[in-house]
Image (spheres, helix red, strand yellow):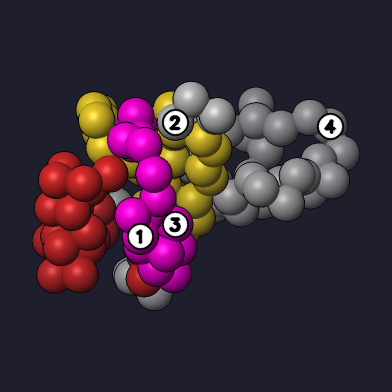
Amino acid sequence: MSHPGFARTPEPPYFAVIFTSQRTDGDRGYEHMAQRMVELAAQQPGFLGVESVRDKAGLGITVSYWRSREDIRAWREHAEHQSAQAAGRRIWYADYRLRICEVLRESAPAGADATSQSG
């Protein structure tokens, strides 16, 4: 059985947007906005899922999965998302990196409840 924090992705290929960030101190509305962005992304065409972690020192990695580069581009250009991106640069992130990758292969342990298990 898959861990509930794992995104249920289709058989590859699909795309991953990897957002690695170092948070500034204090919340200043971050948690609310982060939750809103996940809810909003889930409503966008081509959105497949998201996985996110953050350590106590503020280093976080969020991976969102998308059907196509065009879907990623549309999400990047969404007005509410652009507003959150601007706030992130101004308020919430001391540093960040954004990487876009094509997923060509996915595997899971035998017996896992994964949507795709290409080996």
Is residue 41 one of those drawn in magenta?
no
Asked whether the beta carbons under mark 4 and mark 2 sit within 8 Å of each other, the answer is no
- Compared across the picture, whether 119 is left or right of 79 comes to right
Residue wearing tag 3: 31
- The residue type indicated by label 3 comes to Glu
**Horizontal arrangement in the rendering, residue 45 relative to residue 65 (left or right):** left
Residue 73 coordinates in the image, percent (x, y): 17, 54
Q: Residues within 10 Å of mark 1 (few under 14, many from 20)?
A: few
Q: Look at the numbered disc 3 and give the secondary structure of its residue.
A: helix
What's the distance in space between the residues labelled 2 and 1, CA to CA? 15 Å
From mark 3 to mark 4, how far is it between C-alphas?
A: 35 Å
Residue closer to the observer: 67 or 91:
91
The disc placed on residue 29 is: 1
Crowding at label 2, few (<14), some or many (≥20) Cα neighbours within 10 Å? some
* Residue located 50% across and 55% down the image: 49
- Looking at the rendering, the stretch of residues picked out in magenta corresponds to 18-39
Q: Could you tell me which secondary element the residue under label 1 belongs to?
A: loop
Q: Earlier in the sequence, mark 4 or mark 2?
A: 2
Determine the CA span between mark 4 and mark 2. 34 Å
User: Residue 19: within the magenta?
Assistant: yes
Labels 4 and 1: the sequence-earlier one: 1
Q: Give the residue pinned by disc 2.
A: 58
